[in-house]
Amino acid sequence: MENNNIENIPRIIGKYTSNTKGPLLFVTGGVHGNEPSGVIALQKVFEELKKTRPEIAGTIIGVAGNKQALNQNKRFIDEDLNRTWTKENVAKKKAATQEQKEMFEIIDVLEQYPESDFTKRYFLDCHTTSAATVPFISVQEVNDNDNWAHKFPTYIIRGFSDIVYGCIDHYLSRIGVTGFVFEAGQHEDPASIENHEGVIWLALKEACSLDLNQISCYPECVDNFVKKNAPEQKTFEIIYRHGLEDGDKFKMEPGFENFQKIKKGELLALQNEEEIRSKWDAFIFMPLYQSQGNDGFFVVQEVEYQK
Ligand SMILES: [Zn+2]
């Protein structure tokens, strides 16, 4: 991975506007410090914007998430920056950990771009996963997030972001910014950078009316995501979470991929020597193959999207 690019990363990776009133597109990368893909994609996008200077409506700003952890290539320093954004923590206005300090710095940046200065405010939070996966959007079902998410051509998961408290997307949704989390693929997979770059360009088109033909890397920098790496758009909802207790001996059956079809009765895992079988004809989501975590797996069902 192009790690040398992300040493001493500044908080603001880039900012671009053609001084026309319009929306704000607030893009975060590296909220988890071991996920530099979004940061690298943002660097590429701003380099291209600087070079070709296309017309856009409004402003895009790219922001580094967990700066200190990014610079050390660690997931976090004291605590997970994607769990700190609770109402209580934000109200305290005083940082008790390195990550809370990062959080308040990011809030300070956003506060320089108030709602009143823009026609609308959007966010895009860029992540990657430890296991291989097709790129997917995780959308919290509040405000107009779900409609916005459906402008993007890949799998969309509803209900996953809703069950984890303290994420940055909760905070942004809570203050009325529209957006979603984008999981681009495995941490070190070069395709993750392609997917992040593609989704940022598409967000610029959808939010800030960018004509993609104006940029010199088009179509490749968009089609790597849209045509090469992304599955066709489908919408899924979480129907089951298989939670684990501390001390549980859990072993997923080998070979499950994210979004793989599962059948009723199929053996999914062993937990404390007992067989866990599927009660559903559905799809498996985020099967646990690493040693840590309290989620064994999720089961998701495909649903129709109605506008
Ligand atoms: Zn992440």
Image (tube, rainbow, N blue to C red):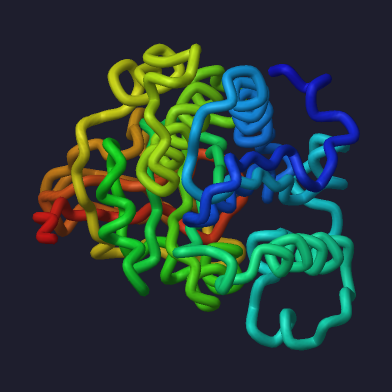
Q: Quadrant of residue 168?
A: bottom right
Q: Nearer the viewer, residue 16 or 84?
A: 16
State left or right for residue 280 relative to residue 154: left
Q: Residue at x 55, y 68 (%)?
A: 172
Relative to 149, residue 213 above or below: above
Q: How many marks?
A: 0
Q: Where does the image place residue 155, in percent across and percent down from the top left?
A: 28, 42
Q: Is residue 272 visible?
A: no
Q: Quadrant of residue 48?
A: top right
- Looking at the rendered image, the quarter that the N terminus falls into is top right
As drawn, the residue found furthest toward the front would be: 20
State left or right for residue 190 relative to residue 203: right
Relative to 127, residue 54 above or below: above
Q: Residue at x 11, y 50 (%)?
A: 281
Q: Is residue 277 visible?
A: yes
Q: Where does the image place residue 216, in percent across and percent down from the top left?
A: 49, 12
- Looking at the rendered image, the quarter that the C terminus falls into is bottom left
Relative to 300, residue 184 above or below: above
State left or right for residue 24 relative to residue 300: right
Q: Residue at x 38, y 19 (%)?
A: 213
Q: Where does the image place residue 89, in percent across and percent down from the top left?
A: 74, 81
Q: Where does the image place residue 12, in percent across and percent down from the top left?
A: 77, 45
Q: Residue at x 72, y 80 (%)?
A: 90
Q: Nearer the viewer, residue 148 or 182?
A: 148
